[in-house]
Amino acid sequence: MSMRMYPYGNTIDEAPAFWQADTLWVLLASAEQTGGRYSLLWEHGPQGSGPGPHTHEQDEEIYVLDGNLTVRAGDRLHVASAGWFLFIPRGTVHSFRVDSQTASILISYTPAGFERVISEMGVPTKVRTLPPMGLPPTVTDSRQIFKVLAQAGAHWVDEPDALRPELEWGDPSQARDLQGRPLSP
């Protein structure tokens, strides 16, 4: 039996917001609002932010509103600025890095699900600013982190991060979650 759908709308100022790592996320549309079909997040991050190599079970669409990013998707490297769009099919290894002082992007996922990584592991906030630098994560148990990632269809990829070569591949002390935070041993 399919879920009855209703029109839905929200704004960046009114939608639920979360701080995760050094990034502000605003959840504009979740599985609950779209019957699981789609999710949409507004992300505002500082220079150097962005996830390391990962895949997920959703298609991902990225639209750059302002700022500059370097995006690795599969074996391609893209330099993106305002007005740039990228479709990343599910299962594709990808990562990105903010190259400008800050960047704002819209990220959508089809079907919904990935937004759980943000809503379940982020710090709820009412303000629309970057989080304080060094904000401690809400979840530090690596088992819980990997459980949420798996339930959300996200998979960390243990390979060198082409966008962050200073991190050594295979060194457990360098293990990071999808937002670049160190994982607890």
Image (tube, rainbow, N blue to C red):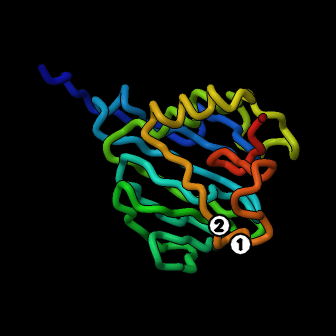
The residue pinned by badge 1 equals 99
Q: Position of residue 162 (x, y in %)?
A: 64, 72
Secondary structure category for the residue under label 2? loop
Task: Identify the residue at horizontal 41%, vertical 61% (top origin).
Answer: 92
Q: Is residue 8 left or right of residue 6?
A: right
Determine which quarter of the picture holds residue 26: top right
* Badge 2 or badge 1: first in the primary sequence: 1
Report the quarter where the N terminus lies.
Answer: top left
Task: Identify the residue at horizontal 52%, vertical 79% (top origin).
Answer: 78
Task: Name the amino acid, label 1.
Answer: Asp
Work out whether 40 lies above or below 124. below
Q: Is residue 159 left or right of residue 130?
A: left
Task: Name the amino acid, label 2.
Answer: Pro
Q: Position of residue 177 (x, y in %)?
A: 66, 45
Q: CA distance from mark 2 to mark 1?
A: 19 Å
The residue pinned by badge 2 equals 160
Q: Report crowding for label 2: few under 14, some 14 to 19, many 20 or more residues within 10 A (C-alpha).
A: some
Determine which quarter of the picture holds residue 152: top left
Disc number lying in front (2 or 1)? 2
Q: Is residue 93 left or right of residue 51?
A: left
